[in-house]
């Protein structure tokens, strides 16, 4: 049952997050993908900040439930459990981004960095664990997603292709969202196979 709940959370979390972020952007016409950070939306007075911050808090809670399911879905090896634990920490950081908006310094900056660093690291660890178990497709997919999540930041700090960080934030988050959805469906499939006749 918990695997089913966690898998469902993995699928709906990205949907919730991007709906709320999109609504926040729509409510603030001055937002610029080139010049702003997504977190700038969290300090705009009125509905914009509410949509952004509470959207992240709700998404963070659902992603935490998804992450805890990894301890059931993945094998019991140290590497798998380490990857799952690091991902749990990433979901806590995601929730904290909404709890501590941009004007709460330096906490907001620290939890934002923690999220975007811990997410690809957890995937790299899980990719390695999957490879050791002979789950080649899962390992390669997770590795590619981890690279896709990290690459926008590496490029940003290398060539500064935009002045703000909204683009690398969005691309990195989209990569994580894809991985969560795929893994969520895998959890649901595993839960259905585990049903007793």
Image: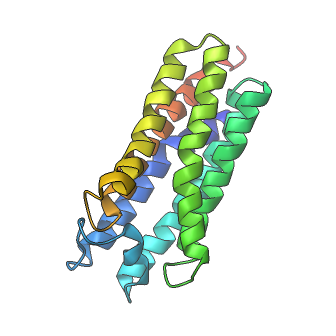
Q: Determine the residue positioned at 68% across, 39% down.
A: 84
Q: Which quadrant holds the N terminus?
A: top right
Q: Quadrant of residue 19?
A: bottom left
Name of the residue lying farthest toward the left: 29
Q: Quadrant of residue 36?
A: bottom left
- Residue 131 location in percent, x, y? 61, 17
Q: Determine the residue positioned at 38% across, 76% down.
A: 40
- In depth, the one of 127 and 185 nearer the eye is 127
Report whether residue 76 is seen. Answer: yes
Residue 133 to residue 42: above or below: above
- Residue 27 location in percent, x, y? 27, 77
Q: Determine the residue positioned at 30% across, 57% down.
A: 167
- Residue 2 location in percent, x, y? 70, 38
Number of on-image labels: 0
- In depth, the one of 144 and 87 nearer the eye is 144
Residue 16 to residue 56: above or below: above
Residue 142 to residue 65: above or below: above
In this rendering, position of residue 188 left or right of residue 144: right
Q: Which quadrant holds the C terminus?
A: top right
- In depth, the one of 187 and 83 nearer the eye is 83
Name of the residue lying farthest toward the bottom: 45
Q: Quadrant of residue 188?
A: top right
In this rendering, position of residue 15 left or right of residue 31: right
Report whether residue 2 is seen. Answer: no
In this rendering, position of residue 188 left or right of residue 148: right
Q: Determine the residue positioned at 49% across, 50% down.
A: 13
């Amino acid at each position: 049952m918990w695997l089913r709940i966690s898998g469902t959370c993995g699928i709906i979390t990205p949907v919730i997050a991007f709906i709320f972020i999109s609504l926040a952007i729509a409510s603030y016409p001055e937002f610029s993908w080139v010049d702003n950070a997504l977190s700038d939306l969290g300090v705009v007075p009125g509905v914009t900040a509410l949509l952004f911050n509470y959207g992240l808090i709700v998404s963070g809670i659902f992603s935490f439930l998804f992450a805890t399911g990894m301890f059931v879905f993945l094998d019991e090896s140290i590497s798998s459990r380490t990857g799952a634990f690091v991902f749990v920490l990433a979901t806590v950081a995601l929730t904290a981004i909404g709890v501590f908006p941009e004007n709460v310094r330096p906490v907001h900056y620290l939890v934002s960095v923690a999220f975007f660093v811990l997410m690809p690291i957890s995937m790299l660890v899980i990719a390695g664990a999957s490879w050791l178990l002979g789950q080649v497709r899962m390992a390669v997919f997770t590795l590619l997603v981890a690279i896709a999540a990290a690459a926008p930041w590496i490029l940003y700090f290398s060539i500064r292709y935009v002045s703000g960080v909204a683009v690398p934030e969005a691309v990195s988050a989209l990569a994580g969202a894809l991985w969560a959805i795929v893994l969520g469906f895998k959890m649901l499939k595993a839960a259905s196979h585990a049903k007793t006749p």
